[in-house]
Amino acid sequence: MAAVVRTLVGSATKLQWQPASVLCSRAVSTTIPAQDPAVAAPVSKPKGNQKVTMIPGDGIGPELMHSVKEVFKHALVPVDFEEIHVSEVQDWGQDHQDTVDKVIQSFERTGVGLKGYITTPTPTKTGELMGVNMKLRRRLDLFANVVRVKSMAGLKTRHHNLDFVIIREQTEGEYSSLEHESVEGVVESLKIITREKSRRIAKFAFDYATKHGREKVTAVHKANIMKMGDGMFLRCCEEVSELYPRIKFENMIIDNCCMQLVSNPYQFDVMVMPNLYGNIVDNLAAGLVGGAGIVPGESYSHSYAVFETGARHPFAQAVGRNIANPTAMLLSAANMLKHMHLEYHGQMISDAVERVIKVGKVRTRDMGGYATTTDLTTAIIDNLHKGKYSSFV
């Protein structure tokens, strides 16, 4: 831009010394010089639809993904899905490792995905200790799982107006898949806690709090018993907290944390914790605001983002019965669109979901109603183009 400006100024300087007749002649005959392409180019927009990896998962996952695709179609969302079926309990005629490789390759193309829960059987058929979920988290380095627990207007629960965030480190800890039978009848399971990953998740939590205007971060641990492992995690959180003087820092033992969540959840703002604690607290907290069908979630690495339900449960007993609640998956999909800078479409979908639940006429059984998955999906579609979205074409 500076080079263009200098050229124009220089031209103007020369023109000041020319006779008036020459100036008039040049004004008529001179064509406008071509602009620098970097200056002339409009704001860049993606050509065609953006690509998203979709993993339906097990249980009700495929049914929830069908709801997402129907809502996206009626909302005219500019997204195309690369759908890949992955399962450890269903036979899709593919080797697990080959399928995982295909998922990784898809994420390398798209950078973002929507994922259903992949059931990890107990015991596994293959004898492998590491399930597909953990393989994907490790390969994609999805170190931070974020679940925002927020009350929904119109949905009656024991607690009201809750709004707090659970941040979980999910690449190590008790999920390291390092177990062995040292002697017959004695099994040792290794819990891995590293300083590097503890500091990374702590920094993520404080950065999240700063970005979203949160005031407090609570580190959840069991350092009174696991003095070295959880002790290191707690020390890392304390060290990182000193870099964020405007964010209040507290710590709480995991068993007390569970009691406090049930009795007084309003005291929490942002919570950060190791892997297993996070899995337990995610599901406990989801129950405070309506259950597994309500709460969305997401997982991040430095390069990828995966959006899924906050409370991970396949709900296998509901498969094929058209009774699953698509709310959590639809809100996760809406958050994914906002992450992709498709804020208009993402907000349209989340507003439609919240409007339907607030009115309360169409609710699935887990929300105290009698509607089917199809009924709730249809109601949300009918509410997409209302209010400020009514002029959208």
Image: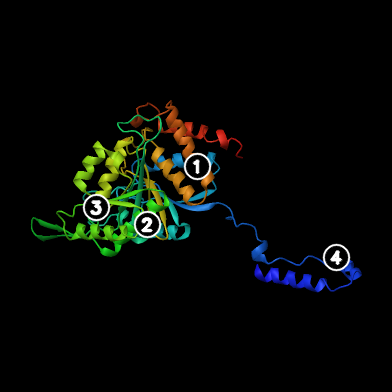
Marks 4 and 1, the one that precedes in the sequence:
4
> Residue placed at 27% from the left, 48% from the top?
279
Distance in Å between CA atoms under marks 2 and 1: 33 Å
Residue 307 shown left or right of residue 275 in the figure:
right
Taking 173 as reference, is 10 above or below it?
below
Question: Which residue is under mark 4?
Answer: 27
Badge 2 amino acid: Thr
**Quadrant of the snapshot with the N terminus:** bottom right
Mark 4 vs 2: CB contact within 8 A:
no
Badge 1 amino acid: Gln
Q: How many marks?
A: 4
Question: Which residue is under mark 1?
Answer: 347
Mark 1 neighbour class, 10 Å CA radius: few under 14, some 14 to 19, many 20 or more: some
SS for callout 1: helix
The numbered dot on residue 99 is 2
Question: Which residue is under mark 3?
Answer: 125
Marks 4 and 3, the one that precedes in the sequence:
4
Mark 3 vs 1: CB contact within 8 A:
no
Marks 2 and 1, the one that precedes in the sequence:
2
Badge 3 amino acid: Lys
Quarter of the view holding residue 203: bottom left
Which one is in front in this view, the residue at disc 2 or the one at disc 1? 1
Marks 3 and 1, the one that precedes in the sequence:
3
Mark 2 vs 1: CB contact within 8 A:
no
Q: Residue 238: tell me if it is visible.
A: yes
Mark 2 neighbour class, 10 Å CA radius: few under 14, some 14 to 19, many 20 or more: some
Where does the image place residue 110, in percent across and percent down from the top left?
47, 57
Taking 5 as reference, is 364 above or below it?
above
